[in-house]
Image (cartoon, coloured by chain):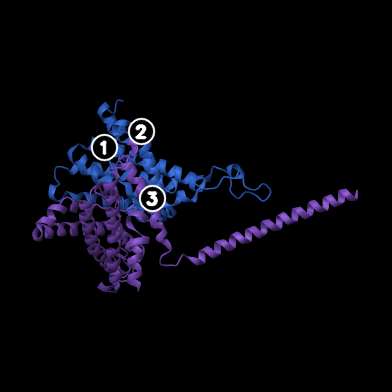
Amino acid sequence: MEHVELFFKSIFIDNMVFATFLGMCSYLAVSKKVATAVGLGAAVIFVLAVTVPLNWLLDQYILQEGALAWLGPEYAEYDLSFLSFIMFIATIATMVQLVEIIVEKFSPSLYNSLGIFLPLIAVNCAILGGSLFMQSREIATLGLATTYGIGSGIGWFLAILAIAAIREKIRYSSVPPALRGLGITFIITGLMAIGFMSFGGMLTGGDEETKEEKTEMVSTNKTEEVKEVVKEDEEKIADNIKEIQK
Amino acid sequence: MGLLSKKDAKLITDPLTDNNPITIQVLGICSALAITAELKASIVMSISVLFVLGLGNVVISLMRNIIPSKIRIIVQLIVVATLVIIVDLVLKAFAYELSKTLSVFVGLIITNCIIMGRFEAFALGNGPWKSFLDGIGNALGYGVILIIVGFFRELLGSGTLLGFPVLGDPIGSPETGPTGLYGLGYENNGFMLLSPMALIVVGIIIWVQRSRNKALIEEN
């Protein structure tokens, strides 16, 4: 259940593109055609699914505070977490290189269609972002880390697929000249992000607790206001009565 | 302009307008959108990128003749990662609260496409001084957009600038009630603080820029 929850959360609620804006550069640059978008999306899913668990292992057994305890009690004090950027990016760059070599060897046709994108992936913020979010959200087990990697990859894939399909169709619409291309893509992405925000309450059932608190706050404020108004009215009435008595 | 020849000055001024990294080259969008809900965060982010890009460009440019072209991406990543770690530690030491708001986005400067893009496109083929100017120019162009977006989002979203209330006090003292614009019935637009609005604000900036300069209009 934990896995299913994290899986859907990383696809819809914490969608890489719409909630955290990761991987926007390649998202904007490669979304002109559906076919290329699918290629890049698939590559991102694959690389995320491999690098997030790998970096989880690195984080857990080398980088975290006290992570080196398995080497012996005298290493337990070390905190190498300041090295995490460099370690994560090195892992990612190496993995991407490896994937490139493997794909070139076993599937030249896939390599021809993916070839240009693979080096791009090394500098795709979505990949490093996946690892950094995995670290800052303190995901507990290796299995969950893999689920998180695959889930956020699929989320990114869905986003680039959707925008590519829209951009193919938008060619036939009369967009104001200055908005054509980049401008309209930004605004469409913004609208899609607003749409994705509606998934926010999917797993919690709408955050009922916080809403209740807010309504309570509002209602108490209102009763106070009403009391004040009532007091003022009473004073006025008293003044009026005094004047009449005079 | 004793220090800067005309060509050198162009390296700095071009990215500010007609060759802006965000609106024209489409580089470094991720961080530009995610952290611009407050003006302060945008300014700090711009300064961090200025530091990393200016210095990184010089380092890469100095090493450009000894980097084997096959592993250049890894070399570039390591250089950037080192500089970013410095920025991250400095922020954690002197502005801890702010480094919490920026969270992973300081780390993501590493994969900020502006940096890799300028290394690839400029620093690998030019001398250190020119590369330095190019880095500064592009980082400034990036910062300008970040600050414009941050300005509007903070002003319209929470009615403050750099944390100072500029539109009056929404609650006010019990005697006077809300002051300033709020006294006239103005309400903050909380929607501006949500992430989708960043995209739409950048879209509008692009729209304005391209309406002013017709040469930038795309075919489709």
Crowd around label 2: few <14 · some 14–19 · many ≥20 (10 Å): some
- The residue under label 1 is B219
Q: Where residue B98 appears, x then y in whole percent?
A: 42, 52
Labelled pair 1, 2 in contact (Cβ < 8 Å): no
Left or right of A66 on screen, residue B63: left
Query: If the image is split into quadrants, where does the N terminus of chain B sit?
Result: top left
Q: Where residue A141 appears, x then y in whole percent?
A: 31, 71
- The residue under label 3 is A191
Q: Residue furthest right?
A: A246
Q: Is residue A125 above or below residue A73?
A: above
**Discs 3 and 2 carry the same chain letter:** no
Q: Where residue A170 appears, x then y in whole percent?
A: 30, 45
Q: Is residue A21 above or below residue B152?
A: below
Q: Is residue A204 above or below residue A242?
A: below
Q: Nearer the viewer, residue B150 or A74?
A: B150
Q: Secondary structure at mark 3?
A: helix
Gap between marks 1 and 2, in whole Å? 14 Å
Name the residue rendered at 37%, 43% in the picture: B202
Q: Residue furthest front?
A: A172
**Discs 1 and 2 carry the same chain letter:** yes
- Of the residues shown, which amino acid type is indicated by label 2? Ser
Which chain: blue?
Answer: B
Q: Where residue B185 appears, x then y in whole percent?
A: 59, 45
- The residue under label 2 is B211
| Chain hosting mark 2 | B
Q: Tell me, what hue is chain A?
A: purple
| Chain hosting mark 3 | A
Crowd around label 1: few <14 · some 14–19 · many ≥20 (10 Å): few
- Of the residues shown, which amino acid type is indicated by label 3? Leu
Camera sees residue A217: yes
Gap between marks 3 and 2, in whole Å? 22 Å
